[in-house]
Every structure is written in structure tokens, then in C-alpha cells.
Image: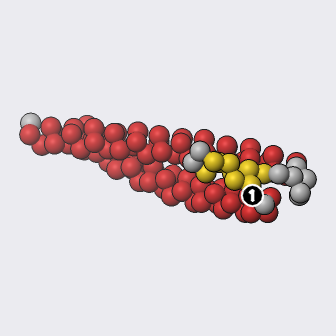
Amino acid sequence: QKQLQELSDAFTQLQTELQTTVEARQKLESQQQENRGVKSEFDRIEDDANIYKLVGPVLLKQDKSEAVMAVTGRLEFIEKEIKRIEKQIEEIEEKTEKKKMEVSG
């Protein structure tokens, strides 16, 4: 009985961990979409267009090439994070499957 309870608790903990990790991936995907939208806007504007960056309560003028590099860098970082989190999700799903077998077996 005690062993079954421990397995059940471990399974519940894995489910919670999986949910948290999936939420993190969704947040990253949302940021990715937002940054792709910004990059798309940058592709449409002239090289000498005025671009402003919000820093705290202040808008600072920014060079287009600087802004494009920043967005590209953010996109690369987000893509790496998504891959890392997807690996985590796979690992958690494997552990969850093993625990499920232990509980039912």
C-alpha cells in the first residue's frame, strides 16, 4: 500500500513537472511569434527609418541594423530554448510512462 502511494505521488509530481514545462514552451512560442512579427516589420521598412526601443519609461532611438541584430539574436536564443524544453518534455513523458507502468503493473 505504501509503495503504491509513493509511486502515485511520484507520478503526480511528474505530471505537474510536465505541465509546468509545457507552459514554459508555450510562453517561448508566443515570444517567438512576437519576435518574428517584429522581424517581418523590420524587413518592410527603409534602412533609414526611425526605430525606437522602449527602455523602462523612455523611448530610445535605435539604428535599424542594431534592432535587426537584437531581434535575430533573440529569435536564435528562443529557438535553442524551445529545443531544450522539448527535450525536457520528452524525458518527462518517458519517466511518466515508466511510472504509469509501475503503478498499473
In the image, what residue occupies the spot 60% across and 41% down? 30
Task: Give the amino acid type for the residue marked by disc 1 in the picture.
Answer: Gln
Residue at the left extreme, as displayed: 2
Residue 97 shows up from this direction: no
Counting from the top left corner in percent of width and height, residue 55 is at 61, 51
Please name whichever residue, 74 or 2, is drawn nearer the observer in this view of the structure.
74
Dot 1 alpha-carbon crowd within 10 angstroms: few under 14, some 14 to 19, many 20 or more: some
Height in image: 20 above or below 94? above
Question: Label 1 belongs to which residue?
Answer: 62
Counting from the top left corner in percent of width and height, residue 18 is at 39, 43
In the image, what residue occupies the spot 55% across and 53% down? 82
Counting from the top left corner in percent of width and height, residue 53 is at 69, 51
Height in image: 68 above or below 1? below
In the image, what residue occupies the spot 78% across and 60% down? 63
Is 100 left, or right, of 84 in this rendering?
left
In the image, what residue occupies the spot 57% across and 48% down? 56
Counting from the top left corner in percent of width and height, residue 17 is at 35, 44
The answer to which image quadrant residue 97 occupies is top left
Is 58 left, or right, of 17 in this rendering?
right
Please name whichever residue, 97 or 79, is drawn nearer the observer in this view of the structure.
79
Query: Considering the numbered disc 1 on the image, is that residue within a helix, a strand or a loop?
Result: strand
Residue 34 shows up from this direction: yes
Height in image: 86 above or below 5? below
Is 98 left, or right, of 61 in this rendering?
left
